[in-house]
Image (tube, rainbow, N blue to C red):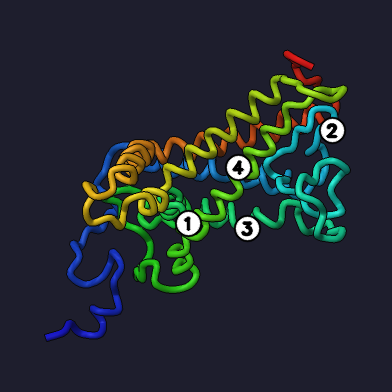
Amino acid sequence: MSAPATEREATGVFSPGRARIAARTLRVDRWWLSPLLTVLGLSVFIVYATVRSFVRSAYWVADYHYLTPFYSPCLSESCVPGSSHFGTPFPELPMWIPLGFVVLPFLLGFRVTCYYYRRAYYRSFWFSPPACAVAEPHARYTGETRLPLIIQNAHRYFFYVAVIVSLINTYDAVIAFHGKGGGFGFGLGNVILVVNVVLLWTYTVSCHSCRHVTGGRLKHFSAHPVRYWIWTQVSKLNTRHMQFAWITLGTLMLTDFYIMLVASNTISDLRFVG
């Protein structure tokens, strides 16, 4: 016999059949610290990235070909000369459209639908739940079966785009080995760009979707030794996916901030060659 309609509809923490505990939690430790730090960390990045994506200044260093990741690829005629590595197929854009509009929505989608970030903002922003053994304030739970959360199921497709963007960022880092008078050049900005792109690759390939693509659908690993080896390496990186998720937020801001300082002539790039 099926459960009464009222029980089927009330699927949240306070639904019938759940323990009746008046207190929100019996935990006595600082369970709220982790979600609080997550809110602060994500908020800092969101505010910084939003502001920098719209200001349209100090994102390109012409002397050394440094381009911030927040504006790559720059495909509009609004881009400053030299910063459009792949041409300008789009006309000038109004100020309310960021110059990196082609890839920014996909990168946002990749981060938002990431398995780790889901856990992070579900707990810290939506309190669903805020911590283990802490009651959430929601009376119903529908999972990721309805809008907007059903979009989470598109994570693997955002992953494919993220791979392409990582290739573009790699190209940007390579052509940045440019001297002020032309030819080969190497400075602190190159170190920052290369470290950032390597960490971005590490975050991307440590993704659960990458692990699934490389070997998640294989039934017999013994018949696919190469894919099995790749799968094992990705699996090792996958155990550090949370750390890479946070580290790359920091390196993205650091890379952009350094390029902004150099592009605005606030500081000079420390040059080793050229």
Separation of residues labelled 1 and 3 (CA atoms): 12 Å
The residue at 45%/58% (across/down) is 156
Q: Is residue 259 above or below residue 21?
A: above
Residue under label 2, please give it.
Answer: 62
Q: How many marks?
A: 4
Instruction: Please name which of the two marks, 3 or 4, marks the residue nearer to the observer.
Output: 3
Q: Amino acid at mark 4?
A: Phe
Q: Could you tell which of marks 2 and 4 lies nearer the N-terminus?
A: 4
The residue at 34%/68% (across/down) is 141
Q: Amino acid at mark 1?
A: Thr
- Residue toward you, 16 or 237: 237
Separation of residues labelled 2 and 3 (CA atoms): 27 Å
Locate residue 16, reporting x and y percent.
21, 72
Locate residue 252, reporting x and y percent.
62, 37
Separation of residues labelled 3 and 4 (CA atoms): 15 Å
Q: Secondary structure at mark 3?
A: helix
Neighbor class of circle 4 (other Cα within 10 Å; few <14, some 14-19, many 20+) is some
Q: Could you tell which of marks 2 and 1 lies nearer the N-terminus?
A: 2
- The image's mark for residue 45 is 4
Residue under label 3, please give it.
Answer: 105
Q: Could you tell which of marks 4 and 1 lies nearer the N-terminus?
A: 4
Residue under label 1, please give it.
Answer: 113
The residue at 72%/20% (across/down) is 186
